[in-house]
Amino acid sequence: MTGTAPESSGGISNMGGRNNSDNVASKRNELESLQQALDKLSLPKDASMGGETDRFRACITECYTGATVWPRRRSSSERSISLKGRQRVVAYAALTRKQDFWVSEEAIPQQIELIGIHLDGLEKEQRAITTKLNRLKKEMEPIEKDISSLEKKLRKIYQRKKGAHARIFEQRKQRDEVNAHHHEYLSVLKNDRELAEQRDAAALEELSIS
């Protein structure tokens, strides 16, 4: 009568809700990672690095997307990049190669779109689970009230039973005391009768004194 079964059912439902939330969070993290990768592959416009413009990063971006920048731009753009800038281009290319950025700029939005669709499905499922949990909670409210009422009644019955046992014990104790006095009285009468039959005056006098 403690309502353990409903709590167990609620625990399973809550576990399902937590798993769905974990899936949503995982997809969001994956979506953010892809968006960051897309930002790194995008052509920088307004940024600058150490006083140098971002033209060398633009060259790398075009190299990743299949363009051949250096053969086509051997005029002003190549001549404007200093030796230090070219070294930075090489270092940047090596770093991004290690970080596995060989993903086309067109493929990342497609992956983002697919993850977004999956994320929408997970969020829809999460809303459905939340709605179901709320409905189950509403259905559980009258049941929990009934359980609480029955528990109160059970406690009252237990208290009454405990009081009844205490009264029975006290009555038995009083009965035993009365029986003891009665047996003692019967024993005295028996002794008086025996002494009277024996006509033992001294013994009768001693018994009456005691």
Image (cartoon, rainbow, N blue to C red):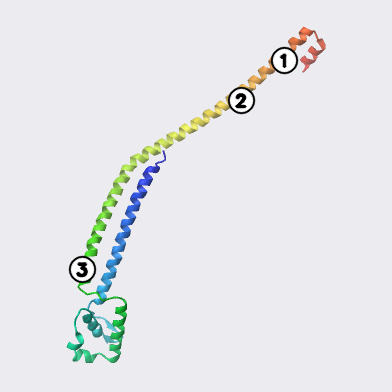
**Is disc 1 placed on a helix, strand or loop?**
helix
Image coordinates of residue 206 in percent, x first then y, are 80, 15
Residue at the location (26% across, 81% down)?
47
Q: Is residue 179 above or below residue 148?
A: above
- The CA span between labels 1 and 3 is 112 Å
Quadrant for the N terminus in the image: top left
Residue at the location (23% across, 63% down)?
116
Within the image, what quadrant is residue 49 found in?
bottom left
**Of the numbered discs in the image, which one, if any, rests on residue 173?**
2
Q: Is residue 209 above or below residue 41?
A: above
Mark 1 belongs to which amino acid? Val
Pair 2/3: label in front: 3
Q: Tell me the residue that label 3 is attached to.
A: 110
Q: Using the rendered image of the protein, determine whether residue 45 is visible from the camera's viewpoint.
A: no
**Is disc 2 placed on a helix, strand or loop?**
helix
Nearer the N terminus, badge 2 or badge 3?
3
- Drawn side of residue 188 relative to residue 72, left or right: right
Q: Tell me the residue that label 1 is attached to.
A: 188
Within the image, what quadrant is residue 201 found in?
top right
- Drawn side of residue 197 relative to residue 161, left or right: right
Neighbour class for label 3 at 10 Å: few (<14), some, many (≥20)? few
Q: Is residue 175 above or below residue 119?
A: above
Mark 3 belongs to which amino acid? Gln
Nearer the N terminus, badge 1 or badge 3?
3
- The CA span between labels 2 and 3 is 90 Å
Mark 2 belongs to which amino acid? Lys
Neighbour class for label 2 at 10 Å: few (<14), some, many (≥20)? few
Tags 1 and 2 touching, CB below 8 Å: no
- The CA span between labels 1 and 2 is 23 Å
Neighbour class for label 1 at 10 Å: few (<14), some, many (≥20)? some
Q: Using the rendered image of the protein, determine whether residue 149 is visible from the camera's viewpoint.
A: yes
**Is disc 3 placed on a helix, strand or loop?**
helix
